[in-house]
Image (tube, rainbow, N blue to C red):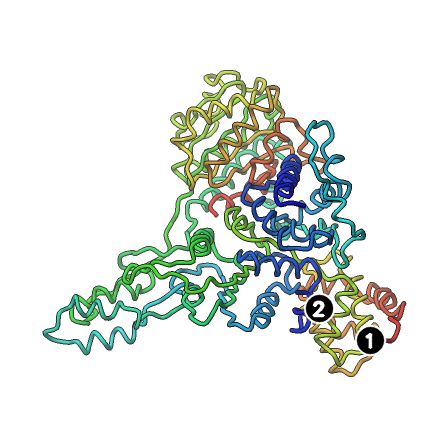
Amino acid sequence: MQEAMERHGYIADPAIATAVFLAREMKKPLLIEGDAGVGKTEVAKVLARLLDTELIRLQCYEGLDVSTALYEWDYPRQMLRVRMAAEGSDPSLTEQVIFSRAYLLERPLLKAITRREGSPVLLVDEVDRADDGFEAFLLEVLSEFQVTIPEIGTIRAEHVPYVILTSNRSREIGDALRRRCLYLYIEHPTLEKEVRIIRARVPEAGERLAGQIGRFLQALRQRRLLKSPGAAETIDWAQALVRLHRDELDPEIVQQTLGCILKDRNDLRDLTPSDLSPLVRQARGIEVPAS
Amino acid sequence: MSEKSLVVHVARFARALREREILVSPADEVDAVTALTLVDLSDRAEVRQALRVALKIRPRDAGAFDELFKRFWESGPAAADPGRSSRPASPPAALLRRQGAAPGSEPESRDLERDVAVGDLPGYSPEALLRKKPFEECTESDLRAMERLLERAAYRLATCRSRRLVPTRGRGAVDLRRSFRKAVETDGEFLRLARRARAVEEPRLVVLCDTSGSMDAHTRFLLCFLLALKKAARRTEIFVFNTALTRLTPWLSPARIGPTLERLAAEVPDWSGGTRIGESLAEFAARHLDEMVDGKTVVIVVSDGLDRGDTAILGAAMRAIRSRARRVIWLNPLMGDPRFEPTARGMEAALPFVDLLASAHNLESLERLIPRLAA
């Protein structure tokens, strides 16, 4: 599994590979938690590529409701139909027509369970941002994989989708939902993994630069930061440095590009140039042996 | 290993986890067994990962999990079950030969557990200072200022809006779906638009407040807070306890707090006496739980957890309450002390059944609590 994921551009450690493998084999949703930017969403994307299936994404936010998550009626078309029916026709018949599946707009959850061509991957992203009520609703959908629409009836899943839920832990996910899923907590990458991520995602970055970036970030995460940079930031930064034609770090360039990895004003302010140079020295200290 | 001994071993492991207060349900155990039939049992690292995933181990429990895992799946279950007579037939250690930790996995995830949600408010006004002042250090005039602040804070609670949209008359966003329904009846003419808006959801609260001697310095403020809460969220039930439980709700008038407190001191048995938390909560569970607590109710226990009674009773009562309530919040005034650890025996027994353990030593801590009551 780990190798398969790597072939699709995702450097997984054994923990991630095992979790994804089990989720696929046991056909259970996988709840992934971890700091921002550690690659939670990426897991779903790579799983979809791996299974060669469609990725259906539901981005959660405060106030997410059924009409954005599940289905909505196609009002403009319904309106046209109602107008066309016009005089003399039986209103109850019109109602039957406009509240049929032809006038239904499928939102991610419904789309995921009605897909005909095999199981899709359903990504429920940042589920912690939706409210408790939605969580309860999600729980129902995930346990039955069926949905009831008052006007139409119950729609059952043709193929049970692979479900990945992610959470930034902005609030605790309810126990019931957590128990329904398998659970994975993604840590910040280790040095070795981080260097491999850089090499895989930014191949233009040389061995030396990748090693230095990796060590710099490892050292940086030891500090008390409000927002620890994740792998996503690492990749951004590596790309920025490559664009700037750098093949190693120096305090000046780090200072100039720090915005790629530190996204909080206080963190940026706290990291003074005098803090920076030892970090850079440390990062440059031991060179990674050339391959 | 046969599937049967796998089941037995997982069950033992789960019990050990539960003893360390890592809550693992039977459903999780089933998941764990299924997961283990899918992985390579000779790969210890993989077994560890699979169990973490299937038993839903959160990062804060990772340390304890790893420790138990080492004892259970490395040296065999015999060593892990000291003092128990039963011995499993086949120690899995023989099967789990491969040594060495999994590359790229680190058990030290505790520093990732930083709680970012609770930030410090910037202090810029006398009010801000007042908010941070511990209750024991307050003067009489501080008290009155605090009472006013508290009332304002509690009022916010009553205006918490749910994110759910409900039909309304005359205001709010247009509800297309219902509008269409109506339009169909009138041949497609939109004579009146249906609207919907965010519902106001009044939180339902049950408060159980400790009034024993060890809580004395704080009681006045906490009751003040509770009275303000009661004003804001009318469906709040308030009980006080020390050696016995008293239902306070019918006595509380929205008038001044001072006289109410004095009346209480006169009439509640054992005001500022000793505590029997367990018995009091058990009494609540037996007499009022079914009728007052449901899936929408937040139960708040205010106590320092210094229990003189039997902690087993306390644990059982908390379990019963937890199983019915939406959330259980324990407010502990001692928590304001940076050296605080929940080591009081009562506190320890109650902790597994508490969703949120928060401090209640100053106004700021109470204010911070308010959004949590509504959510």
Q: Residue A23: x, y in percent?
A: 57, 58
For mark 2, give the secondary structure: loop
Same-chain check, marks 2 and 1: yes
Read off the chain for label 1.
A
Observer-nearest residue: B87 or A274?
B87
Q: Nearer the viewer, mark 2 or mark 1?
A: 1
Quadrant assignment, res B133: top right
Q: Residue B18: x, y in percent?
A: 63, 37
Q: Residue B182: x, y in percent?
A: 21, 64
Q: Residue at x 55, y 61 (%)?
A: A164
Observer-nearest residue: B69 or A285?
B69
Q: Amino acid at mark 1?
A: Glu
For mark 1, give the secondary structure: helix
Read off the chain for label 2.
A
Alpha carbon of mark 2 to alpha carbon of mark 1: how far? 20 Å
Q: Residue B93: x, y in percent?
A: 75, 44
Q: Is residue B146 above or below residue A230?
A: above
Task: Give the class, few, some or many, for how many residues have Cα within 10 Å of label 1's Cα (few <14, many ≥20).
Answer: many
Q: Is residue B184 above or below residue B224?
A: below
Name the quadrant of the N terminus of chain A.
bottom right
Q: Residue at x 38, y 26 (%)?
A: B250
Q: Amino acid at mark 2?
A: Ile
Residue tagged 1: A207
